[in-house]
Amino acid sequence: MDYKVADLSLAEFGRKELTLAEHEMPGLVSLRTTYGDAQPLKGARIAGSLHMTIQTGVLIETLVALGADVRWATCNIFSTQDHAAAAVVVGRPETGGTAENPKGTPVFAWKGETLAEYWDEAEKVFDFTDEAGNPVGPNMLLDDGGDITMLLHLGVEFEKAGAVPGQDSTDNEEFKEVLRVLARSLENSKTRWTNIANDVKGVSEETTTGVLRLYDRFKEGSLLFPAINVNDSVTKSKFDNKYGCRHSLIDGINRGTDVMIGGKVAVVCGYGDVGKGSAESLRGQGARVIITEIDPICALQAAMDGYEVKRLETVVDYADIFITTTGNFDIIKVEHFEKMKHQAIVGNIGHFDNEIDMAGLAKIPGIVKDEIKPQVHQWIFPDGKKVIVLSEGRLLNLGNATGHPSFVMSNSFTNQVLAQIELYTKTEEYPVGVYVLPKHLDEEVARLHLDALGVELTILTQEQADYLGVPVEGPFKSDLYRY
Amino acid sequence: MDYKVADLSLAEFGRKELTLAEHEMPGLVSLRTTYGDAQPLKGARIAGSLHMTIQTGVLIETLVALGADVRWATCNIFSTQDHAAAAVVVGRPETGGTAENPKGTPVFAWKGETLAEYWDEAEKVFDFTDEAGNPVGPNMLLDDGGDITMLLHLGVEFEKAGAVPGQDSTDNEEFKEVLRVLARSLENSKTRWTNIANDVKGVSEETTTGVLRLYDRFKEGSLLFPAINVNDSVTKSKFDNKYGCRHSLIDGINRGTDVMIGGKVAVVCGYGDVGKGSAESLRGQGARVIITEIDPICALQAAMDGYEVKRLETVVDYADIFITTTGNFDIIKVEHFEKMKHQAIVGNIGHFDNEIDMAGLAKIPGIVKDEIKPQVHQWIFPDGKKVIVLSEGRLLNLGNATGHPSFVMSNSFTNQVLAQIELYTKTEEYPVGVYVLPKHLDEEVARLHLDALGVELTILTQEQADYLGVPVEGPFKSDLYRY
Amino acid sequence: MDYKVADLSLAEFGRKELTLAEHEMPGLVSLRTTYGDAQPLKGARIAGSLHMTIQTGVLIETLVALGADVRWATCNIFSTQDHAAAAVVVGRPETGGTAENPKGTPVFAWKGETLAEYWDEAEKVFDFTDEAGNPVGPNMLLDDGGDITMLLHLGVEFEKAGAVPGQDSTDNEEFKEVLRVLARSLENSKTRWTNIANDVKGVSEETTTGVLRLYDRFKEGSLLFPAINVNDSVTKSKFDNKYGCRHSLIDGINRGTDVMIGGKVAVVCGYGDVGKGSAESLRGQGARVIITEIDPICALQAAMDGYEVKRLETVVDYADIFITTTGNFDIIKVEHFEKMKHQAIVGNIGHFDNEIDMAGLAKIPGIVKDEIKPQVHQWIFPDGKKVIVLSEGRLLNLGNATGHPSFVMSNSFTNQVLAQIELYTKTEEYPVGVYVLPKHLDEEVARLHLDALGVELTILTQEQADYLGVPVEGPFKSDLYRY
Amino acid sequence: MDYKVADLSLAEFGRKELTLAEHEMPGLVSLRTTYGDAQPLKGARIAGSLHMTIQTGVLIETLVALGADVRWATCNIFSTQDHAAAAVVVGRPETGGTAENPKGTPVFAWKGETLAEYWDEAEKVFDFTDEAGNPVGPNMLLDDGGDITMLLHLGVEFEKAGAVPGQDSTDNEEFKEVLRVLARSLENSKTRWTNIANDVKGVSEETTTGVLRLYDRFKEGSLLFPAINVNDSVTKSKFDNKYGCRHSLIDGINRGTDVMIGGKVAVVCGYGDVGKGSAESLRGQGARVIITEIDPICALQAAMDGYEVKRLETVVDYADIFITTTGNFDIIKVEHFEKMKHQAIVGNIGHFDNEIDMAGLAKIPGIVKDEIKPQVHQWIFPDGKKVIVLSEGRLLNLGNATGHPSFVMSNSFTNQVLAQIELYTKTEEYPVGVYVLPKHLDEEVARLHLDALGVELTILTQEQADYLGVPVEGPFKSDLYRY
């Protein structure tokens, strides 16, 4: 079998954790039960790019259980859990796969890839083989951040142009690797990406960033196939962002620093869903939370929820913990670092590492970066003041803890599977464009997670449903409804 | 001056409360400052129908301060605060109005109107006088629930038909009054309502119910002028519903019953915005809260927020307090009442009184309704069991307390004023249809309430705004954003 | 029958409320069931002085149900609920009492007594009649604040001295009345109080203040009989103070001002049990709470509970709500009032009205006190700034709302009844001194309130009890245990 | 230098963590500043036995900074942090100690000692050397659990008896080691322990267990020197237990299982201080918490705090997480395990591992114990059901996380240092007996932690202090006060 992971001997431990995770991912497991016989993804060849974790393992094996042929890479060079990758490659117990003779799903991912390796492996998810043993491309994409979607679109574009720009056309180290891979491909085939794109029925995209790229392509007319925006399902954005961060923020701070959160002043930059979950998390541990916000509506929400809302400048010199949740950049700047207290803790749970100006921090004359342990550094100022930065400014819940827990990822990934089924089985209903999942599917995702929590759902009578003007079985709300 | 209220001698007390309320309604007061010179509503003749409370008094006087001529009725026969009505009629101190010589705004409302009186008074808000002293209709409507919008639409319809149906064409006691008023009108003029409708530039509507009626008319093609749906502004639905009910639910329970909420089991039927605020309110007092829900997404939210989610049947025999928040009907039924504990407390903060089957309750053989004090009744079952019902099943926060506090109403009413300005000054931008306020105005409403809470708003740099793809001054979010 | 109340026609409404309250006072009702047959207070003649409210009515009728003969006065000139007094006088339904022919318990209390009336009525609780119809004194006292205990002790002292000091020996207006009453008594009898004191087996005292007076007397050797300090039972101090105030603080603020608490900055002066309950109450409504404290342990608790802890001076100019909970005096002073924001709200839920310097406030040159409604005043400063003071600085939960709810008073009053039974039936075990209730009775009080809340108590096995070194049935904790 | 630790090369990492921890232990650091010059422990030779963690390192170095000569062992074979031991041995930077030439404090501890090693090392803390280089015993003990106090008392007893019982006199494996060590000692010296005991001025004891042993000895008359019970300082019991567990409970669950706590049903057995902190911790993460209790007062508190209170039997079949906090034994029994859901999680944060019947669990026929990772096991029942047990039933916050955070330990350990100073410098004030620290020192401990949290303490005026009857500088409360 075709795969590239760290070490297949980790598969046994990975399988144990996969089994535990399945219990916490009732949405995915229930899809296996519901659709196992119907095999709605029979014939689907899914190229996937998403953090190769235990939870993703359960996602992959669910896609396979529904009939799909799957190839997988990671979307982040650091986030792979090697035991998860190994277990997926070896395969579920019923396949009889072993480390010597793996029978699972091809995965191309390990923790700590280089950028060159990352793009070499990303390319491999496009190399399927049909039943006759001939090379063939995927007919579905499942993406997180849009990297493989971009690779395919650029491939098509360069094939149309007949040439790939030289690596010196860009200063971006990562994009040089993209160009390298596509140039190599163009040497081998002038139509590879074009052929693939013709086969692809659609892509389901996990994140805000990836979705923005898709909307941009759609607006400029270059989108090649329909896309479902999984990110904006209620059961994704309101659960993954809010409840996921409520769990993983303090988990990351605790594992990274062992510092008591109770009694401390914590600044949360941003009061969107991530900020709301983060603030609740810190308050639940007894911290006094201060919010910064740019949006007056979110700022007013924060105030009504009992938080102090201030500019960072106002509180930077006495707060103990600083967390960015914005998706924007330059939130915590050098001028802020300079005013912080000794042993202030700084971390990011928003998006990219530029929420915190790490580059600027490193350039302060005389500053010393001292590693306490992996992903935890004290930056020692010339006057001896130390500031602790978690995960080098990258997502601390991934870097210092284990990311979102399985239950919340089950919501996100059940959306992913349903989106794959929609695009693959109702192709004609989705002309090229960017869609959110229909509300009845969003509600279905939620419904699949209720039993695990002992929730009893009330059922409308027909009379009540008529009174509200909704079907008895939903959907229950207008698209404007904000939950 | 032309008005009809309970007693002008209450005006002094009303003025005192209006002055206190202005401090709590910074959005409205700030509109007076911002737009006082520009007089954007100069020439507007606004016919208003909305609960005639102190907060509404501040709204009315804000509309007047912006140049409008206003006539006002209530939208509910019980909710008028007589001292508020009196003070608005007498007028602001600078007018020099007195009870003997009132110089304020005409109001037609008192607490405890009959249905006949209600519709007689509603008709009067259409009777403006122009500067020359000639009768003229309004050119703007401000409505809550859609009663005066309906009156105008039916008036036009019946004038077109040349006849008003007889009162015996309906079983509905209230609709008989509508027909009576319109028949009387048709006798006097065949074109009155048609002329008025031609002048009306639009209506701003406060509630879900009114908005549904407007969408229905728009769909069937009978809507006569554009409408702004104030109800679905974030600063209305997410503030009025959630934070308003958080305040007024326990206030109503406390005033009605003096029963300790802490330690009790409280069932909240529905976990929409009203339910969310209600649950938080009860939990904040130490109750153990159980949620019932029909929508799996809201049910999952409730569970993730730490609430037990069950069907009413499962918990009805041991809960102490039952609150409906659904907007649906038949939520608490006779079969539930029969299983409740002795001295269970039942109330509604949702919408109409049919959330609780009051009619069914009254029909239980042998049951006795015993008034403890106004708006608080014990229903004594044949076996001696008593159940306490608040406000006869109508909105308990209005019936047992004083409704939403000024600050939250300031959000709703600032939306109303901005909607009136939009429709009146940008008529051409609003062809017949139903609109929500543009997001930048929704954000503006929030912004006007920040200073009062000591909130410091962070301002984006141009670079940050570009990175996010939004203007520095907003709006900051897509229409899909759920807050 | 011998009584003095406002109006017996209020008895019917009072009875209705008594019946409702019984359901919320399971401790008292259960004592009636448990001890009704045994009649442990048979022969007890209890002179009581405690706020004559509905809850006290349930207490009185419980004492009677256990065999006692009772006479009652209030301990506060404002706090009497006239309908409660009337209903207790008329008597429980089974007595067949009516307003014309009352058959209940003698009460001497009405809302709004003068100080002279107060002490005249207080004296009357000592005038029992024995079965033969002869005058006789009480043999038990139940006191709140220590007024009747003081009257009796001073009476004995003056009889011993043979004279009562003249009223001009004191500047204290209230103490003049005490001297007047005792002088009148001494004229009639030289041994009245001495005889009574010889009969009294003990007193149970409700409050901190009363308890302090008792300890002082005990230390100086002048205490005439044993006393039980009910105030320091866990089920009193930790429940009445914390949970009672959690309920009644916001109830008082809401009824007094209708101002939204959510989003506001509230300062709670003091973080003892009252402060803890108050802070929780305000936070539960979405306020941002700041604590002031003098005790470093309580201050550290507040910080660990997530509250900001500052001196009043630091925050006085931006907070919206100020609540004193200290039991000390001069907490909010003129210099603070002068720095407050316009429309700041000030109230006291601690002890006496001198927590707030009301006298100093009134002396500010040019200040005007303007009543908005009873118990709610705006103090208008010369520059137009207004500050709202609740209940004239007295306890706002009593003045603006209805005090602690029945359930929490059931805890306090069950302690009272058990204390009366202890002192009356185990006289020999209590030599003159001041005692707290034995822990097993404190636990019993709690136990009697569990069923009403659906609590299932776990029972130790004998082995587990032995392991812990406690009896299976308790008491479970050492006297040092802090709960 | 005389020491025995795992590996001195860990000292550098340990020093880094010690430096970080000092910032979080302001009480200890401030004692160094305050008493550094006075050297109140000059001449003290302290034998210490307490978990050899980073926090204990800061404690040891504080004792040394105050003049003491110190020798240290651990009180638990598993809890030593080897890098902490190494850093303490190497010594503070100003000593110039290195791994080759350590100059710190002798420590006898490493992670994973055998019982034999444990008691061999414990003995060594008694082997001081005086300035002249002669062997001498300690004159102070600092103990956690009472092991070295017991060793000394038994040593004296056996010397008096002239013989040590044979190891076969006991079935207890651990006690055999105690007898072995003491027998070896008696061979070498007939008066060693007696001489030491004559020199010892006192012991400060950290835990409930140790304190109970001391009270038992005192009651039976065998206590040889005074003891201070640090455990019952408010700043220990109410902080370490409540806030420490609020932090470390979820930290342990998260690190052990990565399972989402939000939305789950968690049972907390016991609602003492540990239970209160645990319940708050779980609720803060969105769990629905159910309490079990034997004490009706604590049960009523739990109910009033909004928790469901049930017997374990009632909820065992649907709860997801079970946490014991009782200090009792047999709380979770085989019959409970058998009824639990698949993948239920079970852990103990109370005291000994017998809170959970681990022995009984292991004896279920056909059950398999499968290690997922260290300290996390799934017990697989014959029917395939798995239950996850954390830390083999021992304290999960120590086993799965890093125990209480530094800030809370700073409170406990500042009590320890103050207790050492009291006993050492005021020997005459403490005749043989068991004492709690005087309240003014308890308050001092709190005071030393306020600045770090930005707390401003209010200072009483003399008039206010007189009114309350307390000194301006405290202590402020009676011994009965419960906080």
Image (spheres, coloured by chain):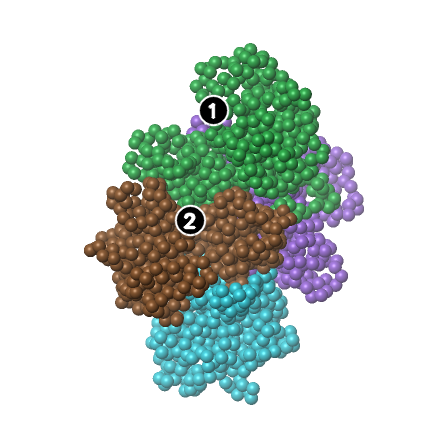
Chain colours: A cyan, B brown, C green, D purple
Closer to viewer: mark 2 or mark 1: 2
Q: Which residue is mark 1?
A: C115
Q: Which residue bears the numbered disc 2?
A: B112
Q: Position of residue A183 (x, y in %)?
A: 40, 81
Q: Residue at x 47, y 52 (%)?
A: B395
Asked if disc 2 and disc 1 are in contact, CB closer than 8 Å, the reply is no
State the SS at label 1.
Answer: helix
Quarter containing the N terminus of chain C: top right
The residue at 47%/57% (across/down) is: B352
In space, the residues marked 2 and 1 are separated at their CA atoms by 42 Å
The spot of residue D148 in percent (x, y) is 66, 41
Where residue D194 appears, x then y in whole percent? 69, 34
Query: Looking at the picture, which amino acid does disc 1 mark?
Result: Leu
Compared to residue B347, the image places residue C388 above or below, namely: above
Left or right: residue A313 versus residue B67 is right
Residue A295 visible, this orientation: no
Residue C280 shown left or right of residue B136 in the figure? right
Which kind of residue does numbered mark 2 sit on? Gly
As displayed, is residue B448 above or below residue B169? above
Q: Secondary structure at mark 2?
A: loop
Seen from this angle, which residue lies furthest left?
Answer: B132
Chain that bears disc 2 = B
Question: Would residue A223 be seen by someone viewing this image from the given angle?
Answer: yes
Q: Which mark is residue C229?
A: none
Residue occupying image coordinates x 55% and y 46%: B370
Snapshot quadrant of residue C38 = top right
